[in-house]
């Protein structure tokens, strides 16, 4: 067994001031504008079908935004109230249910499978509930079974039973407790255990009563098992079915087979705002007590590509390194949709991104939006800009631009003025002006012909005066 990474849980309920974000900065809504620009740039430059997001700020306000299309053929726009698949974010709910049952003395994390379920082929009955929760069971992931995938897609109307899904489990990856490997099968078994414990109830009923209703998650549903009101729309999902480079709308394809097969491992549909609120309740100790939350964030190290920014796995939670900050949450992928929900105990922010296409590069979106929030505080003191009436940066035009833009400023006293360009990561791109400047209005031309498309920030410094503007380069 690899050594565990034990998360520093003491920071969870302590007010962190290391980032020193200005409340004035929040008050004037500037952060919302910057998140808008960052999302616009991500959408324009990367060709996503649609992106729906929610961002909980340290002051308690939530920024929500959707961009792109729900239906490409009709040009129906995606909006923030449309439901998208949360995919494996579902595991944060299933694990919370199991931990609540633990708190109610129905089970122990050390319980073995044989205490709750009959024997199934290729599944070691000595595997514990904890090993299911943190993916150290070694059980084969049924979603990797090619025959299983074909069977599910060839019969889209079928509602699969958990026991049938277990029929796609092949030989284990390793002996229980000796390594780590993500497996959706673990959470199918956890759902079965929960239903075994709670007589005359189901996983969907328990999630509804314990979590969805209790925390006013009015746009969150357990697909197939719950009826979604006609007043709510589910966004179309897209996947390149025949590998021809064209995204195919799978709305015509019944959701029955896909979501019944995903079940306790990935069947929830929701909105980013609902999922951000869920994470806020969870990580602030409203859902489970501190002792159980500590167990949840007891992370096993994982060996995944660095680009995934996932470095550990706890009890239904992933541990991330995003821009050198620790985050907790979960990512997911299901035919037609990609999802990510992350919380930073240090930055005190929660971000959810839902995309209506399969295998989208969601990590890049998350990292960029987090960077938008943090980069200028740490790199160029963005949130500490001062306003002195002797200087003013008036405007930048055109904006968006390609590749030339004019930066106009005025000064009422003689002073040295410096104008610098920074990228979305807060890195210095170019100093376009730095000289002693007479009184008057001045025009500085920036030629960005050698820079890639994206969002840039223009910073003007004159003595103690600092001001920042944003612009978008589109090529």
Image (cartoon, rainbow, N blue to C red):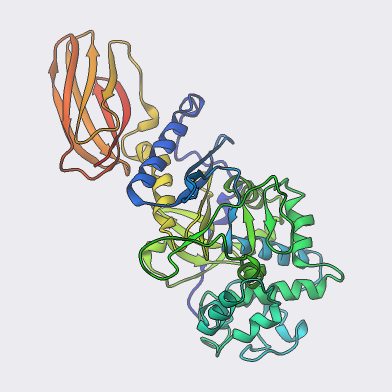
Q: Quadrant of residue 414?
A: top left
In front of the other: 25 or 14: 25
In front of the other: 49 or 93: 49
The residue at the point 62 percent across, 70 percent down is 262
Q: Position of residue 456 (x, y in %)?
A: 29, 37
Q: Is residue 93 left or right of residue 456?
A: right
The residue at the point 47 percent across, 58 percent down is 357
Q: Is residue 7 left or right of residue 433?
A: right
271 shown above or below 469: below
The residue at the point 48 percent across, 77 percent down is 2
447 shown above or below 434: below
- Quadrant showing the C terminus: top left
Residue 141 in view (yes/no): no
Residue 23 in view (yes/no): yes
In front of the other: 161 or 465: 161
314 shown above or below 56: below
Q: Quadrant of residue 382?
A: top left
In front of the other: 354 or 444: 354
Q: Position of residue 267 (x, y in %)?
A: 64, 64
Most distant residue in the front direction = 74
Q: Position of residue 369 (x, y in %)?
A: 42, 45
Q: Quadrant of residue 468?
A: top left
How many numbered marks are there? Answer: 0
Q: Is residue 321 left or right of residue 448?
A: right
Q: Position of residue 36 (x, y in %)?
A: 43, 36
The residue at the point 35 percent across, 45 percent down is 44
């Amino acid at each position: 067994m690899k050594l565990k990474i034990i998360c520093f849980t003491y920071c969870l309920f302590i007010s962190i001031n290391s980032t020193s974000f200005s409340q004035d900065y929040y008050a004037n809504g500037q952060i919302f504008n910057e998140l808008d620009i960052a999302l616009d740039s991500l959408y324009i430059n990367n060709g996503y079908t649609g992106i729906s997001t929610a961002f909980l700020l340290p002051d308690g306000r939530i920024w929500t935004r959707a961009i792109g299309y729900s239906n490409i053929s009709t040009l129906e726009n995606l909006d923030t109230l449309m439901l998208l698949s949360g995919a494996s974010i579902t595991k944060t709910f299933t694990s919370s249910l199991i931990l609540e049952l633990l708190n109610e003395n129905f089970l122990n994390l050390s319980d073995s499978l044989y205490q709750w379920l009959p024997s199934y082929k290729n599944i070691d009955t000595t595997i514990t509930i904890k090993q299911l929760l943190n993916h150290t069971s070694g059980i084969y992931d049924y979603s990797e079974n090619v025959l299983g995938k074909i069977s599910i897609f060839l019969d889209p109307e079928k509602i699969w039973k958990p026991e049938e899904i277990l029929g796609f489990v092949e030989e284990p990856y390793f002996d229980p407790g000796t390594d780590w490997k993500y497996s959706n099968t673990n959470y199918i078994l956890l759902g079965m255990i929960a239903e075994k414990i709670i007589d005359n109830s189901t996983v969907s009923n328990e999630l509804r009563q314990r979590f969805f209703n209790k925390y006013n998650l009015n746009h969150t549903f357990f697909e197939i098992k719950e009826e979604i009101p006609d007043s709510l729309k589910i966004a179309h999902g897209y996947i390149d079915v025949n590998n021809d480079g064209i995204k195919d709308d799978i709305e015509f394809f019944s959701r029955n087979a896909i979501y019944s097969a995903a079940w306790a491992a990935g069947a929830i549909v929701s909105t980013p705002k609902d999922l951000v609120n869920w994470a806020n309740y969870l990580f602030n100790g409203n859902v489970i007590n501190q002792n159980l939350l500590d167990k949840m964030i007891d992370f096993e190290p994982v060996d995944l590509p660095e680009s995934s920014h996932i470095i550990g796995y706890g009890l239904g939670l992933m541990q991330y390194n995003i821009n050198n900050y620790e985050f907790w949450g979960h990512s997911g992928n299901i035919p037609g949709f990609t999802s990510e929900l992350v919380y930073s105990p240090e930055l005190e922010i929660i971000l959810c991104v839902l995309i209506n296409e399969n295998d989208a590069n969601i990590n890049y979106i998350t990292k960029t939006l987090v960077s938008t929030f943090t980069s200028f505080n740490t790199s160029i003191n963005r949130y500490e800009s001062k306003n002195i009436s002797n200087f003013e940066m008036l405007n930048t035009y055109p904006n968006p631009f390609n590749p030339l833009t004019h930066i106009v400023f005025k000064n009422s006293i003689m002073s040295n003025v410096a104008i610098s360009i920074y990228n979305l990561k807060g890195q210095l791109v170019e100093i376009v002006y730095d000289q002693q400047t007479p009184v008057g209005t001045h025009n500085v031309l920036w030629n960005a012909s050698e820079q890639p498309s994206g969002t840039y920030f223009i910073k003007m410094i004159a003595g103690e005066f600092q001001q920042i503007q944003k612009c978008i380069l589109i090529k």
